[in-house]
Image (cartoon, grey):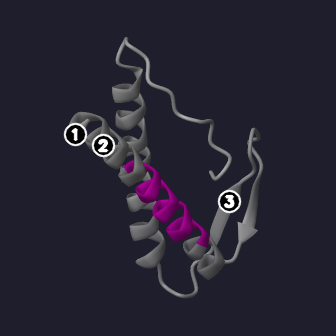
């Protein structure tokens, strides 16, 4: 998720749509983290390969750690978007 395109201000309100999309991704990632953290230690976790219908067995703790990192990155991006909007309002 770190390879995101630079955000640009457009008059048609696409910034609002980007913010809504980011908020939706945050909510989804929260559910993933919650579900992984509530799994019993002996449960199996499978990860889907990008652009594929193939799943591979994955380590639960590593998957949970990756999911938490992704959630942190999404929250950081959302906070940066909020701060840039507040900065433009003050000007």
Question: Mark 3 touching mark 1, by CB under 8 A?
Answer: no
The disc placed on residue 87 is 2
Label 3's element?
strand
Q: Residue at x 36, y 43 (%)?
A: 84
Q: In the rendered view of the protein, which quadrant contains the C terminus?
A: top left
Q: Which circle, 3 or 1, is nearer the viewer?
A: 1
Q: Which residue is disc 1 drawn over?
A: 90
Whole-percent x and y of residue 59?
68, 77
Q: Label 3 to label 1, Cα distance in Å?
A: 44 Å
Magenta-span inclusion, residue 9:
no
Q: Main secondary structure of the magenta part?
A: helix
Near mark 2 (Cα within 10 A), the count class, few <14, some 14-19 or many ≥20, is few
**Furthest-top residue in view?**
12
Magenta-span inclusion, residue 69:
yes
Q: Which residue is disc 3 drawn over?
A: 47
- Magenta range: 66-78
């Amino acid at each position: 998720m770190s390879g995101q395109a630079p955000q640009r201000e457009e008059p048609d309100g696409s910034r609002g749509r980007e913010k809504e999309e980011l908020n939706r991704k945050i909510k989804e990632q929260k559910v993933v983290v919650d579900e992984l953290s509530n799994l019993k230690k002996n449960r199996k976790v499978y990860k889907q390969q990008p652009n594929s219908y193939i799943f591979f067995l994955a380590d639960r703790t590593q998957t949970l750690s990756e999911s938490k990192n992704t959630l942190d990155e999404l929250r950081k991006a959302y906070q940066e978007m909020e701060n840039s909007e507040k900065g433009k309002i003050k000007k």
